[in-house]
Amino acid sequence: MSDVTDQRAARIAVPPIARGVAFFLVGLLGIHVAVTFLWNAPSNPIREAVNEEVRGYIRPFFQQNWSLFAPNPVNSEDEILVRARLRDPASGDLRTTEWVSATGFEWTEVRGSPAPSRASRLSSNLHRRLNSAWNRLSDAQREIMAADYADMSNWKPLAEDLIEEQGGESSSRVATMVRADRVATGYATQVSRAIWGDEVESVQIQLQRTPVPRWDDRLEPEPEDPRRTYRDFGWRPTLDAEGQDDDAFARTMQRLGAAR
């Protein structure tokens, strides 16, 4: 009887390495569940304290987009276009560049890669953020967003104009739009410097949406003039955000095909 018990115990004994791996995987799963809970939980002090860390983990790999499913699947290609004004160091003249699709560079990171880096999602996430904020504005406020601003050290002039247009009362939609505009300006600044160099003085962005052909028309030649829609933002001075690394950003853009 003793021999049978010993043999059974030997058969069910788990090696220490296997136990260690199991505990490690369970720990990872617990951390993932905790972070996901914080991401989906209502606003609270704990979530606010670790919001940036949680956001960096969840996006873009664990972010859910219900537009993937019917009845409203994603049916368009969304791009952010950027152009800049450059100051000629010799003559002092200003030159305006052509529009360049920043999203187009990021798409090169996706093609042929089963696990593209986060660099492939920067402008797509920003486009969604800008478009969502834009949709909440009135027509008059959208005209303000399309206006040029030269003095934007703290984005206060833009915020004040948007607030005045809605009767002088501040609101979350204004705050959301101003924050998104500031982020977009910092992004456009880095894109412009990576492509055209350090002589960039101001930047402008444009949201472009191109409808995807219907399934029945997928094999047809692409139309010469697709039904694109545009949303224009005004000129903004370059923005150097805290923690912004122009050299690292430029190296990434050059890897994606951008060249000065």
Image (spheres, rainbow, N blue to C red):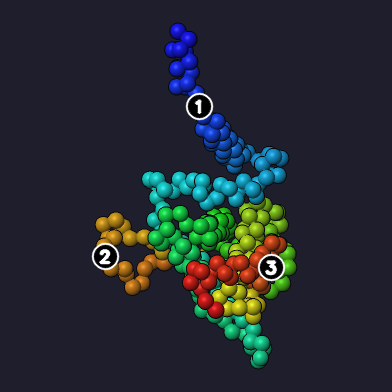
Q: How far apart are marks 3 and 1 (CA)?
A: 56 Å
Residue identified by numbered label 3: 240
**Within-10-Å neighbours for mark 3: few <14, some 14–19, many 20+:** some
In front: label 2 or label 3:
3
Q: Which amino acid does label 1 sit on?
A: Val
**Label at residue 210:** none
Is disc 2 placed on a helix, strand or loop? loop
Residue at left offset 26%, top offset 57%: 216
Question: Which badge, 2 or 3, is on the more N-terminal residue?
Answer: 2
In front: label 3 or label 1:
1
Would you say 98 lies left or right of 75 here? right
Q: Which amino acid does label 2 sit on?
A: Glu
Q: How far apart are marks 2 and 3 (CA)?
A: 45 Å
Q: In the orientation shown, which residue stands out farthest toward the front?
A: 3
Residue at left offset 66%, top offset 41%: 47
Residue 50: percent from the left, percent from the top?
A: 67, 45
Residue at left offset 63%, top offset 61%: 183
Do tag 2 and tag 1 residues touch (Cβ < 8 Å)?
A: no
Question: Which badge, 3 or 1, is on the more N-terminal residue?
Answer: 1
Residue 117: percent from the left, percent from the top?
A: 51, 57
Question: Which badge, 2 or 1, is on the more N-terminal residue?
Answer: 1
Would you say 212 lies left or right of 239 here? left
**In the foreground, 35 or 224:** 35
**Within-10-Å neighbours for mark 1: few <14, some 14–19, many 20+:** few
Residue 74: percent from the left, percent from the top?
A: 41, 53
Q: Assign the C terminus to one quadrant of the image.
A: bottom right
Q: Assign the N terminus to one quadrant of the image.
A: top left
**Label at residue 14:** 1
Residue 174: percent from the left, percent from the top?
A: 65, 56
Residue identified by numbered label 2: 220
